[in-house]
Amino acid sequence: MAQNLVAGIPISTGIAVGRAFFVNRGLRGRLPRRMVRKEAVQSEIDRLRAAFAEAEAQLLDVRERVPPELKDHKHIIDSHLMMLKDPNLFGAAEKIIGSLAINAEWGLEKAVDELEKVFAAINDPYIRDRMQDVRIVAEQVQTRLLGERKDIQAMEGRAIILAHDLTPGDTIGLNVQKIMGIATTLGGKTSHTGILARTLGIPAVVGVESLEDAAHDGDLVIIDGLKGKVLVNPDEEELTQYADLQHQFEDYHTSIVRSCQLPAETIDGYRMQVLANIELAEELSTVIDNGGEGVGLYRTEYSFLNRTTLPSEEELYEEYLNLAATIAPRRVTIRTLDMGADKFMSHFGPVDEPNPALGLRAIRFCLRHRELFKTQLRAILRASRVGNVSMMFPMISGLKEIRRAKSLMADAQAELKAQGLPFNAQMPVGIMVELPAAVMIAEILAQEVDFFSIGTNDLIQYSLGIDRTNQQVSYLYQPLHPAILRSIKQVVDAAHQTGIEVSLCGEVASDPFCVPILMGMQIDCISLTPKAIPGIKRIVRQARMEECVNLLKQVLHCRTVGRINRLVTDTIFQSFPEELSFYASLLDTDDMGG
Amino acid sequence: MNSNNGEVRRQVKVSNQLGLHARPAARLAQEAQQFESSIALIQDETAVDAKSILDVLTLAAPFGATLEIQAKGSDAKGAVERLEALFLNRFGEER
């Protein structure tokens, strides 16, 4: 048995075995607190000043090395630098050390506590959250006071990175070649660490609550990025077992990647298209390398974020044109701006909405800001002259929104024509079906558009009435809830009765446990994160349509999620035994909420 | 616009829709630090040090708030004018 086994959220697949290297630990509870003699006060203040200066020097160094694609982090680092120089932090700590005659660490802790109270009283949640930055900055100073100066650059040889949390500064400093795996105490499914780890293909587990008690520098650690486990000082047997699993996973991975360019066709000849979800044209090579047959969802928010001015039509046109031309002759579906809720923050005014997820976002936002929307429509239309471009509107709730969006599109087309700018007048136009209302009237909406794309992430949240990022209710996030299955089926059937294409994007599409059911519904395409494509294509290629249809039939007879999940897991176990050990499914098989 | 003993005051309005959030606050403090004068930012009864990002943040001045910049010292006039300009162009942000 391992000395310690702790669990967290798997966010980047794979197995890593190596020595632990702690980048930063949570400091609370470990800080030395002591009174000092009057004569020693000055030396404590000097220590504090030196620690601030060191922290500043390190941040300045990091700032110099910010790569252009992370330029958003630069301003975070700038404000951290300002905080390091702030009289309210250093000055307050200095005063406390002097007046109470205590050590530097304790003085800084007290100064931070004082600030915490001030920030806690602020009404504006966005400003209140900036206390996080104060804490990050103070911890960097504390680390230096404690003489734990090492940072990632100090790491010798390859290692498993463990941390309380990885700050933007740490992330930028990462020397990628040396990192075998990552585990952190904080963080969730959408954390920055996860995105980074997946991009780099490094196994990672986040949200490991007792990580800091369980593991120490130099411990032998196994990161199980498949099931979300961290094993500290494992025994012989576990090591052998994981070495085998690692081997198998790598073999499996090589084999699925090797066959990923083959079409996604079942044994009995049913063909499904497997497309990719991306947000940057740079990802196109990953799409093609992983066997993506095109782009089913191109998110367009990126060029609107992290900047102080709106992108011009020319800028957007170049972006979309490059995208369409690079992926051609494969298809690309561009989703118009889906700003709002979470992404709203930096540009389009205050989030004064008590309920941003139900507020002014996506198509509603675009129909309100018509000039901005038209700029984007014109850019997409102009790009449609090359390759195989389609366009879709997000968050449609009814016919009127489609008609208003289409009338703006007609205006844009008329303008382009008048200006003599070419575009594809036959460009397919579709909608995202992600609101329960759109599901209910799918057969009406199908008359108006060329295709549907079911957005299951939002559909699940809106249908089951849960915020998935809220840990209190996230157990209710059940992709195979009978209501969700019926919704998806209703949309697929409505599309097919009208003769339009239907695809599905959302995490469900990359879950090997859910895909056979979608196949049973005879969905035309699925769109998923590029890295997951080889695994899903392999599932499709090993499946039989007949069995998928059967599975769907049985599943639709089940009255509880628990029953469905068991049925699906059993089926997968029989049909794809190999997959079972490599995937952590979205499904929760322990019957929560039955 | 009073000016005595090198003290200069001016009223400004927060026109950033998010109020004086992190980026403008950092910008304001950064610019204020370039001046020798002591500079206060006053909202209602509360006065804070314009050179401190934490002070400026905790002022939590919302969109539309009227603030007073008060500078005292040799370069007070230049400081007030510089900071006023920042408020006027929304600290270089779109909204």
Image (cartoon, coloured by chain):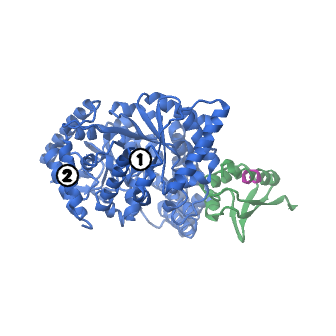
Query: Does residue A259 appear to the left or right of A152 in the view shown?
Result: left
Above or below, A461 against A251 in this view is: below
Q: Secondary structure at mark 2?
A: helix
Query: Does residue A64 appear to the left or right of A443 in the view shown?
Result: right
Specify the colour of chain B.
green
- Check whether the beta carbons of the residues at disc 1 and disc 2 lie within 8 A of each other: no
Instruction: Report which residue position mark 1 lands on.
Output: A452
Amino acid type indicated by mark 2: Leu
Above or below, A460 against A81 in this view is: below
Can you tell which quarter of the image residue A533 is in? top left
Quarter of the image containing the N terminus of chain A? bottom left
Q: Position of residue A550 (x, y in %)?
A: 18, 50
Q: Which mark is residue A215?
A: none
Q: Position of residue A579 (x, y in %)?
A: 20, 44
Specify start and end residues of the magenta stretch as a single range: B83-87
What chain does badge 1 belong to? Answer: A
Q: Is residue A274 visible?
A: yes
Q: CA distance from mark 1 to mark 2?
A: 24 Å
Q: Nearer the viewer, residue A287 or B21?
A: A287
Q: Secondary structure at mark 1?
A: strand
Q: Is residue B84 shown in magenta?
A: yes
What chain does badge 2 belong to? Answer: A
How many numbered discs, if any? 2
Q: Position of residue A559 (x, y in %)?
A: 23, 65
Instruction: Report which residue position mark 2 lands on.
Output: A551
Q: Position of residue A178 (x, y in %)?
A: 34, 37
Q: Nearer the viewer, residue A415 or A68?
A: A415
Give neighbour class at mark 2: few <14, some 14-19, many 20+ (Cα, 10 Å): some
Chain in blue?
A
- Residue visible at 20% across and 62% down? A563
Q: Is residue A260 shown in magenta?
A: no
Can you tell which quarter of the image residue A420 is in? top right
